[in-house]
Image (cartoon, helix red, strand yellow):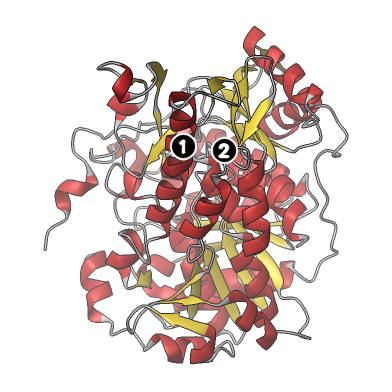
């Protein structure tokens, strides 16, 4: 089979105005970025969909992946292609990839095989500059906080919370000392960098309903605390206005196309294991008014991105998912069953490419838990087996049997990588059938539960933990946030994506574990608390052989 790059370069993109016309948009609804990509003017475009019934809403999630991923983005793109092929008017809504992982461990971020986005290289690198706008807005606010302290500190800032960000994997920046060299270089203090996709500004961009809401959320961002424990916001620092100006173009969704020239919205890119891991509210709300179906992707497994979509994002959008596609690969399930170990940048172990039914049966415990997690929210699960040439008929039949027994509405083999939309027809038909079931979507916990109760509920019901263990720091932080009136926020869990637990070594469906919560932070502008569980880094590092080494002109 040709390489991803060869396939992408063999397909001539349609003029983006022709792609837009398929969903009723005209050139007046677009800001053109050349012939192959555009920003959509949300207010103008929304008028085109006024009066239409809302599209049916489908989320693509997965089992706990290997470091290579299990093809969730490929499946999302291919499912959109397949849905359009069977006559269902569909828009796919995806996050914009972070440049850090794309040039680090993951490689290209535009799908793969015959389920890719065009222009693929531009989707991976820069696109229309939204990532840089988020970086600039965050760092402008951080600079203004330090400048305020330097110029007399009228607000009495004692503790600056906001870290600087950069859209690159760079481990030496995780913890730094800033202000060295005397008073002229600013206050001397410890600081650090997060990756841009982990910043609250990115979470705000993804959750804001419109430009006005974006501006209000930026103003509510807590940047620092005073000596007597009062929060200092971006509004207090007079930074929220310039942040909104820097993001005024970034809030417009980006329109690109897949290899079969169907419309795809690519917008916002919060991390799935740290932030809420979902594409933007603006893009999804616009898409449901312009199409009959919307396929969106949630980051990592159903324990992370999908849970956060259901309990954080859907609280903002008001949209009710009808179907969740749970992507699994035979190789990952065998790894969860104790056979082989997948390491990025190294050849796949032979054990994972050979039939091993006992390991597969054991590893399917992970799939079963994710099916349960979807059903826990009243959403119909459809399992997509992302097909590889080494998968055997017996292995596929075993996964189908176990998944159906666990309550999956359907199981379909997906060949979208090899065959594009044609290879996803069975999956598309299964999704359409599953969506005809009852609408039973509900949140996992009520708003008025305490933050500790919300954390415990997620850990026990979604992860399968016995209990949680709050550090002394986390307990103090929860008391502080509750006293400040933030206890009603939903909770965003930051943990490893490789396991249902907070320990990446616990594969399959672990039992008898406790989730350690070492710290809790408040994203007041985004509107959630997030709990850091176990050893989770908010700034990744580059591997020895990174994806960046394989790019050239």
In the foreground, 31 or 329 = 31
Picture layout, residue 486 above or below residue 381: above
Q: In which quarter of the image is residue 342?
A: top left
Q: Quadrant of residue 320?
A: bottom right
In the foreground, 466 or 57 = 57
Q: Distance between the residues labelled 1 and 2?
A: 7 Å
Where does residue 333 sit, x and y in percent of width and height? 49, 40
The answer, for residue 472, to whether it is visible in the render is yes
Picture layout, residue 371 above or below residue 21: above
The residue lying at 48 percent from left, 90 percent from top is 27
Where does residue 129 sit, x and y in percent of width and height? 37, 61
The residue lying at 33 percent from left, 85 percent from top is 35
Where does residue 293 sit, x and y in percent of width and height? 65, 75
Query: Does label 1 or label 2 sit earlier along the sequence?
Result: 1
Where does residue 339 sit, x and y in percent of width and height? 40, 31
Residue 517: give its label.
none
Q: Residues within 10 Å of mark 2 (few under 14, many from 20)?
A: some
Q: Residues within 10 Å of mark 1 (few under 14, many from 20)?
A: some
User: Which quadrant would the C terminus be assigned to in this image?
Assistant: bottom left
Residue occupied by mark 2: 237
Q: In this view, does 411 lie to the left or right of 173?
A: right
The residue lying at 40 percent from left, 38 percent from top is 165
Tags 1 and 2 touching, CB below 8 Å: yes
Q: In this view, does 106 lie to the left or right of 402?
A: left
Secondary structure beneath disc 1?
Answer: helix
Picture layout, residue 108 above or below residue 515: below
User: Which quadrant would the N terminus be assigned to in this image?
Assistant: bottom left
Q: In this view, does 344 lie to the left or right of 373?
A: left
Q: Quadrant of residue 292?
A: bottom right
Residue occupied by mark 1: 144
Q: Is residue 57 left or right of residue 304?
A: right
């Amino acid at each position: 089979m040709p390489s991803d790059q060869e396939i992408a370069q063999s397909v001539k993109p349609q003029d983006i105005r022709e792609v837009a016309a398929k969903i009723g948009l005209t050139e007046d609804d677009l800001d053109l970025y050349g012939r192959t990509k555009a920003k959509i003017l949300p207010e103008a475009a929304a008028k085109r969909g006024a009066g239409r019934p809302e599209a049916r809403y489908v989320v693509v999630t997965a089992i706990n992946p290997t470091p290579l991923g299990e093809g969730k983005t490929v499946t999302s793109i291919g499912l959109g292609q397949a849905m359009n092929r069977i006559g269902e008017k569909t828009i796919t809504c995806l996050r914009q990839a972070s440049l850090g992982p794309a040039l680090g461990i993951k490689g290209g971020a535009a799908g793969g095989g015959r389920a890719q986005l065009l222009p693929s290289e531009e989707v991976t690198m820069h696109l229309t500059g939204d990532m840089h706008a988020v970086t600039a807005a965050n760092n402008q606010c951080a600079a203004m906080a330090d400048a305020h302290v330097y110029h007399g500190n009228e607000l009495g800032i004692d503790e600056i919370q906001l870290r600087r960000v950069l859209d690159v994997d760079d481990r030496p920046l995780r913890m730094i000392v800033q202000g060295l060299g005397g008073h002229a270089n600013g206050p001397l203090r410890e600081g650090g960098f997060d990756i841009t996709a982990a910043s609250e500004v990115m979470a705000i961009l993804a959750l804001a309903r419109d430009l006005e809401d974006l501006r209000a959320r930026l103003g509510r961002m807590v940047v620092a605390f005073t000596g007597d424990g009062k929060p200092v916001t971006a509004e207090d620092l007079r930074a929220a206005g310039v942040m909104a100006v820097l993001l005024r173009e970034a809030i417009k969704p980006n329109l690109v196309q897949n290899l079969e020239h169907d419309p795809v919205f690519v917008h916002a890119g919060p991390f799935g294991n740290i932030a809420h891991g979902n594409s933007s509210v603006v893009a999804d709300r616009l898409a449901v008014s312009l199409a009959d179906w919307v396929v969106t992707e949630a980051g990592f497994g159903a324990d992370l991105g999908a849970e956060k979509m259901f309990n954080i994002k859907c609280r903002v959008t008001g949209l009710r998912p009808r179907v969740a596609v749970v992507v699994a690969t035979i190789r990952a399930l065998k790894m969860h069953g104790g056979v082989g170990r997948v390491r990025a940048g190294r050849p796949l172990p032979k054990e994972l490419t050979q039939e091993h039914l006992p390991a597969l049966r054991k590893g399917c415990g992970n799939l079963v838990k994710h099916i349960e997690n979807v059903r826990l929210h009243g959403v119909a699960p459809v399992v997509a087996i992302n097909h590889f040439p080494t998968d055997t008929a017996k292995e596929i039949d075993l996964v189908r049997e176990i998944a159906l027994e666990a309550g999956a509405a359907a199981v379909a083999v997906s060949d979208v990588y090899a065959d594009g939309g044609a290879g996803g027809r069975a999956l598309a038909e299964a999704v359409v059938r599953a969506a005809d079931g009852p609408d039973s979507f509900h949140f996992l916990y009520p708003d008025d539960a305490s933050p500790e109760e919300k954390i415990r509920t997620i850990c026990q019901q979604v992860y399968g933990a016995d209990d949680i263990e709050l550090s002394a720091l986390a307990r103090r932080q929860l008391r502080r946030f509750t006293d400040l009136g933030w206890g009603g926020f939903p909770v965003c869990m930051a943990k490893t994506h490789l396991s249902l637990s907070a320990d990446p070594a616990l594969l399959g469906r672990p039992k008898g574990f406790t989730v350690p919560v070492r710290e809790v932070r408040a994203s007041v502008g985004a509107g959630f608390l997030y709990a850091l569980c176990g050893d989770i880094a908010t700034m990744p590092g580059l591997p020895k052989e990174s994806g960046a080494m394989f790019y050239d002109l």
